Image (cartoon, coloured by chain):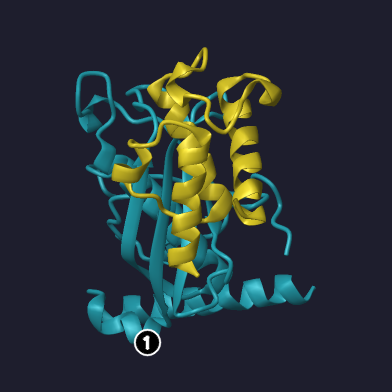
Chain colours: A yellow, B cyan
Amino acid sequence: MTTEHNDIVHRITEIVATELGVAADTLAPDTDLRGIEGADSVRLLRVVARVEQTWDVELDDADVFGVASIADLSTVVGDALRVKA
Amino acid sequence: MTAPEMSAPELPWAVLEDYRCFGCSPHNPHGIALTFTEHSEGLQTSFTLGRSYESYPGVVHGGLLGVVCDETMGNLIVVRTGLVAFTTSLRLRYLAPVRVGVPYTCVARLGADGGANPLSTATAEILDAEGAPVVTATATYRNVPFGTARERIALSATEAGRLDQALTATAGSQTRQETA
C-alpha cells in the first residue's frame, strides 16, 4: 500500500462522508458503498463526480459501476492518474 | 484577475444583428437564448427549460444539457481570450434527472492553462436550486484567432469586419484587466 494510495483513500473517504452525510470515522476502506445508510444511485454518482473533479480525471463507467468500496474506487483513481501521467 | 460578480460580459456575437446561435442568440425562436453573468471562478448562466426540450415526461433531454454546458464553457473562453473556441470533445456525466420548468444554474471554469493554449480544457457543472450538482462536464476546445476561423463561418464581409473588431476589443479588454 503506497502513501499515494493511502492519500487517495483518505480523500475519497472524506468525499463519501460529505456526499452521503455520514461521519468519516464510520467509514473504512472496505465499507460497502451501497450499504451505507442514505446511499442511493444519485448520491453515489455525486461521489464519482466529485472524485473526477478533485483529481481532474475521467473515469470509465465500466470501472465506476463496478466498484463496491472506497478501496476499489481508490484503485480506479490511482490507475487513471497513472494513465494521465 | 477578478471578475465582478453577476455583471454580464459583452459577448462579441452581439454585434451581429441576426446571429442565430441555438444556445445564446436572442434572435433564434427555436433556441434557448442563454444569457451569462460573471462568476467568481468563471462564467455562469441560469436557465429553465420547458416541455419543448423534454425527453422522458418531466425530464429535460440530456443533449440540451450538453448544449448548456458547451455554451457556457465556450463563451467563457471567448470572453477571456477574444479567440473563437471550437469544441473538439465534450464529455458529460449525468448525476440526476433535470426537471422541466425548474430553474438551474450552469457554472463553467477554465482548465489549468486558462484558455491560453490552442487546445485548452474547461469544466462545467449544472447545479439545482440547492446548489447540488446534477450534471458535470469536461471539454476541450481549439481556440483560434478570428482570421483563422473566418473561412468556416458564414458571414458577409461587413459582418466579418464587425465581429473581428468585437473579438479584438474583447481580447484587449482582458489584457487591460490582467495588467491593471
The answer to whether residue B43 shows anywhere in this view is no
Residue in the picture at 35% in, 47% down:
B92
Image quadrant where one finds the C terminus of chain B: bottom right
Total labels drawn: 1
- Give the residue at the far front of this rendering: A1
Residue B2: x %, y % from top left: 73, 59
Which quadrant of the rendered structure holds the N terminus of chain B? bottom right
Q: Would you name the residue on which mark 1 appears?
A: B147
Q: Where on the picture, by quarter, is residue B113?
A: bottom right
Residue B17: x percent and y percent? 34, 62
Q: Residue furthest top?
A: A37
Q: Return the residue nearer the eye: B159 or A27.
A: A27
Residue A35, above or below B31: above
Residue B168 is situated, as x and y percent measured from the top left of the image, at 52, 80
Question: Where B10 falls versus A35 (above or below)?
Answer: below
Residue A29, percent from left and from top: 57, 33
- Dot 1: element: helix
- In the picture, measured across the screen, residue B26 lies left or right of residue B112, that is left
Between B20 and B62, the residue placed more toward the observer is B62
What residue is at 45 percent from the left and 80 percent from the top? B118
| Left or right: residue A80 compared with residue B66 | right
Say which residue appears at 39% left-offset and 32% top-offset.
B95
Q: Is residue A67 above or below residue B4?
A: above
Using the rendered view, name the quadrant where residue B86 is placed.
Answer: bottom left
Q: Is residue B122 visible?
A: yes
